[in-house]
Amino acid sequence: MLKIRKEQYEELGKVSLKRFEDSMVEHIKEFFPKYYEIHKEPLIRKVILYAVGRAESYNLITERDVCLYINLVFLLGSNFDTDPQLPWAAAILNDETITDSVTRIDKLHDKGMEYLDQVAGIENEYLGRALLKVREIPIEDFVTTPTANSGDIAITQLQKIWQQKCQYMSETTLHKFIRDAIESAKDYNVTTQRGIVLYTALMFLLGSGFDKDLQFPWAAKVLKDQSISTESTRIDRLYKEAMAFMEKWLT
């Protein structure tokens, strides 16, 4: 009888994963051409492999399950599964009453599509307007009242930028999101109102884990750059990189 050694199983697994990775690259190229154009293939591959690992952690292992999960990663952010802006995602993924992966991924994907229709718009019209509004806001305008609370300023700006998303989020979720954003910004010594409001706006637009998301390498590069000595300079560069990224989406 033919025996297959452990090393051979591992190599066969690599071949299978590489085949799936290649097929997903073509899938993104066909169905998400703008993402492919902006991120380029090497980064697309990194995001795919990251998503495969996250899907596996939720016992989503069939090609269909993982493909749908990858779709959501590109549409909602690489860390959508733990994003406090999307509490329904974690609820579905960790729901112990759902006993099979097909039901779980279908429920997750359906909810994701429903969310995007309401928040981004059927043709992404709300998202497009939000990106345009952000691009039109000078960085100085991210703070309009120097004596006001940073959280209040952030909420005012978010409502101006993307009203549909604010309406979708409950008041409790929105305020918790603001608190989380302020705490996350502190990890990078961002503590001024100007910095906090910009950081919060980027979390709102790109996902709560934007600072660690493989899809936005420019964010981590700026936030972790030890050669930047002042918060003001860091925020200026973060703003510049963010505007350049959004310009690509609007081109």
Image: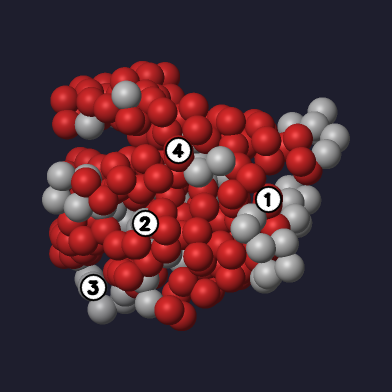
Q: Percent x, y for residue 208?
A: 50, 55
Residue 127 visible in image = yes
Q: Which quarter of the figure is the C terminus placed in?
A: top left
Q: Nearer the viewer, mark 3 or mark 4?
A: 4
Q: Secondary structure at mark 2?
A: loop
Q: Which mark is residue 98?
A: 3
For the point 46% across and 66% down, the residue is 84
Task: Of the two numbered discs 3 and 4 on the same chain, state the one appearing first in sequence.
Answer: 3
Give the amino acid type for the residue marked by disc 2 in the picture.
Trp
Q: Which quarter of the figure is the N terminus placed in?
A: top left
Q: Is residue 154 left or right of residue 85?
A: right
* Residue corresponding to mark 4: 135
* Label 2 close to label 1 by CB (< 8 Å): no
Task: Of the two numbered discs 1 and 3 on the same chain, state the one appearing first in sequence.
Answer: 3
For the point 38% across and 77% down, the residue is 170
Task: Of the two numbered discs 2 and 4 on the same chain, state the one appearing first in sequence.
Answer: 4
* Residue corresponding to mark 1: 195
Q: Is residue 124 left or right of residue 180?
A: left
Q: Quadrant of residue 105?
A: bottom left
Task: Of the two numbered discs 3 and 2 on the same chain, state the one appearing first in sequence.
Answer: 3
For the point 14% across and 50% down, the residue is 122
